[in-house]
């Protein structure tokens, strides 16, 4: 099979399409012929050498795919063969074939394209965990979605709209019209201005009840300040560190030094809470994650989950796909097709 191999830490030139042995299904597994694979910000951080959870290089990245079941291992029903599925993959998804536990697959609805299907798992599960499971967002509360134009951001917007919350979102200006059309109530340009005074002035200085923040570093201090009493802040990324080579290492170090340190007494006296999410550390909680996925698939059939594919790149154009995201051009999901 062909696979996208990250050969070393570095710029986009370290990625190559190479031949690898076809995977064989172990007990309880299926092998999927991949039609589309999701590209995530974590893949970029892993290539840059800034993602501690990434596999040792050379490696094949990829957390999610859509495709058809090609073969099944012992203990899996043979009728699955040929079925279109969506699956979460613990790396290895950016390849023509991938072996995964049958329990990590979900039927792909017929009217959903393979590209759109590959845009669901990571973005929507992350947004679900942040907004619903851990963030407890309620109707008429206000939520601030940082990076609202990214894959997780758009997913969070769908879920927040369905809940009936008032939505604020930071994004590059060029994405604001699209975000308004998707239902974002208050887009904020966080690149030409400081987003905190803008948010405070449009909330009558009260702030918001929930903030989801993948930027990290000093931004977490500002997000914490922007919480209204009973507010919750979900931290789940460190986008500010993104860069190849020594620049990335310096940015990551600066971000770590600029992070807030939370004190339980301070949290208590300010009526605020802070929580963290790492979806990549949920593999031991398969049933819980599968439950979230069932809710997401229900939302898809009801029409309020609307995966948006920005662009799809052939495997051979993997460098362009990474550059597209790193230069902040994407609105929503970027997928890779074999
Ligand atoms: N913890 C978890 O379980 C988990 C799961 C999924 C994602 N994440 C994190 O969530 C964040 C968003 O992920 P995603 O997959 O939704 O991203 P994405 O779709 O690839 O979106 C990337 C967007 O982020 C914004 N951005 C902010 N800082 C950036 C930087 N330094 N360089 C390039 N772009 C930057 C850009 O949009 P604007 O300029 O318009 O804002 C860019 O278009 C990442 O930090 C990722 O690691 C965490």
Image: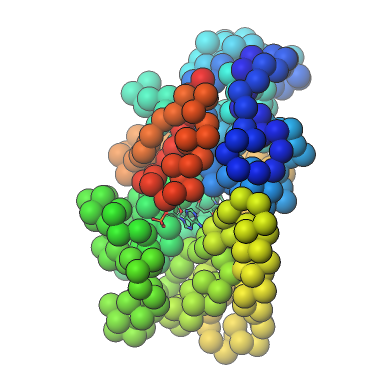
Can you see residue 124? no
Q: How many marks?
A: 0
- Measured from the top left, where is residue 331 in percent x and y? 36, 46
User: 327 and 293: which one is in front?
Assistant: 327
x 52%, y 25%: residue: 315
Q: Is residue 16 above or below residue 49?
A: above
- Measured from the top left, where is residue 206 in percent x and y? 36, 83
Can you see residue 6? yes
> Is 14 positioned to the left or the right of 332 in the image?
right
Q: Is residue 153 above or below residue 231?
A: above
- Measured from the top left, where is residue 174 in percent x and y? 29, 54
Q: Is residue 217 above or below residue 92?
A: below
x 61%, y 23%: residue: 17
x 66%, y 64%: residue: 250
- Measured from the top left, where is residue 19 in percent x and y? 67, 16
What colour scheme has been applied to the protein in the rendered image?
rainbow
Q: Is residue 112 above or below residue 258?
A: above
x 66%, y 29%: residue: 5
> Is 34 positioned to the left or the right of 259 in the image?
left
User: 150 and 90: which one is in front?
Assistant: 150
Give the position of the N terminus as an image quadrant: top right
């Amino acid at each position: 099979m062909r696979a996208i191999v990250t050969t070393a830490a570095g710029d986009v030139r370290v990625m190559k399409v190479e031949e690898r042995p076809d995977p064989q299904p172990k007990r309880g597994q299926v092998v999927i012929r991949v039609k589309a694979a999701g590209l995530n910000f974590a893949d970029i951080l892993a290539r840059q050498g800034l993602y501690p959870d990434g596999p040792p290089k050379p490696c094949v990245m990829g957390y999610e795919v859509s495709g058809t079941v090609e073969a099944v291992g012992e203990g899996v029903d043979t009728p699955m063969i040929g079925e279109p599925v969506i699956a979460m993959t613990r790396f290895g998804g950016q390849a023509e074939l991938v072996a995964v536990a049958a329990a990590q697959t979900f039927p792909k609805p017929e009217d959903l394209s393979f590209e759109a299907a590959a845009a669901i798992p990571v973005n929507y599960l992350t947004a679900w965990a942040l907004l619903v499971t851990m963030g407890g967002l309620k109707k008429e509360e206000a939520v601030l979605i940082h990076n609202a134009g990214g894959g997780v951001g758009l997913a969070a917007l769908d879920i927040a709209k369905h809940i009936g919350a008032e939505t604020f979102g930071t994004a590059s200006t060029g994405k604001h019209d699209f975000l308004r059309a998707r239902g974002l109530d208050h887009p904020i340009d966080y690149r030409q201005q400081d987003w905190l005074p803008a948010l405070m002035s449009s909330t009558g200085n009260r702030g918001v009840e929930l903030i989801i923040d993948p930027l990290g570093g000093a931004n977490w201090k500002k997000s914490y300040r922007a919480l209204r009493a009973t507010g919750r802040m979900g931290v789940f990324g460190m986008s500010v560190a993104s860069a190849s080579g020594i620049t990335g290492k310096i940015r990551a170090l600066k971000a770590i030094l600029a992070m807030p340190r939370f004190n339980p007494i301070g949290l208590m006296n300010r009526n605020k809470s802070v929580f963290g999410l790492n979806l990549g550390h949920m593999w031991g909680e398969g049933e819980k994650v599968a439950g979230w996925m069932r809710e997401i698939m229900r939302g898809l059939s009801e029409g309020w989950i609307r995966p948006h594919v920005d662009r799809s790149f052939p495997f051979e154009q993997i460098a362009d796909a990474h550059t597209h995201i790193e230069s902040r051009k994407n609105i929503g999901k970027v997928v890779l097709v074999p």
